[in-house]
Structures are given as C-alpha cells and as structure tokens.
Image: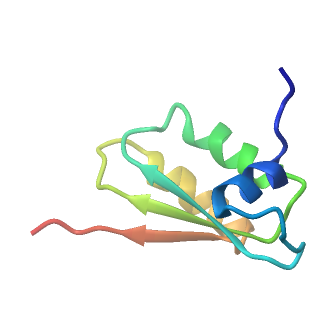
C-alpha cells in the first residue's frame, strides 16, 4: 500500500488526471462540536503542498468553541471562508 498524495486524490475526485496547479479546489469542513479536532484538521489542510484551495467551514451551530477556533484561523488565512447556518 502506498500513500496517495493530495493531487492524486484531487484527480480522483474530479474524475480526471488532467489538472493544473492553477485549479482551485474547495474543501468543505462541517463544524459541529469539534473543538478537540478542528485545530489539527485545519492545520493539516493548510499544511498541504497544494495551496490553491478554498476551505469552506460550515457552522452547524454547535455548542462548543469550535467556531472561535475557526475564526482565529480565518484571521490569518484568507482561504478559510465561514458559512453560518441559522435555525429559526
């Protein structure tokens, strides 16, 4: 077994081996009571060798401090976008 790198994974996802380093990849991260894990999750994504990413963090209205952590990351990296859901 060999480890599949980020670009191979991306090529598998989009169904093509023809990609460019200019292609923008979107990564969706649901945020719901994940304060124990969200820091390492975002650090792992941001540490990838491929940098043309947008990271869509979806606020699912959890009850912990997950979103505060995401907001701190977003202050230092413009690729992180926060999408908030509001329940009525």
Q: In this rendering, is residue 16 above or below 62?
A: below
Residue 72, position in %: x, y? 61, 59
Q: Of residues 27 and 63, which is closer to you in this image?
A: 27
- Give the residue at x 56% y 42%: 38
Horizontally, residue 19 falls left or right of residue 63, namely right
The colour scheme of the drawn protein is rainbow
Name the quarter where the N terminus is drawn.
Answer: top right
- Give the residue at x 83% y 55%: 7
Residue 74, position in %: x, y? 63, 66
Specify the farthest residue to the left.
88
- Give the residue at x 82% y 62%: 17
Horizontally, residue 79 falls left or right of residue 88, namely right
Name the quarter where the C terminus is drawn.
Answer: bottom left
- Give the residue at x 77% y 54%: 46
Number of numbered callouts drawn: 0
Quadrant position of residue 10: bottom right
Specify the farthest residue to the top.
1
Residue 35, position in %: x, y? 48, 38
Q: Of residues 27 and 33, which is closer to you in this image?
A: 27
């Amino acid at each position: 077994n060999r480890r599949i790198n980020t670009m191979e994974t991306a090529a598998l996802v989009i169904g093509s081996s023809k990609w460019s380093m200019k292609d923008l990849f979107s990564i969706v991260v649901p945020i719901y009571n994940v304060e124990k894990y969200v820091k390492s999750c975002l650090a792992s994504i941001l540490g990838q060798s491929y940098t043309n990413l947008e990271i869509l963090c979806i606020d699912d209205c959890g009850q912990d401090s997950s979103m505060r952590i995401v907001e701190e990351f977003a202050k230092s990296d413009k690729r992180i976008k926060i999408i908030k859901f509001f329940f009525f």
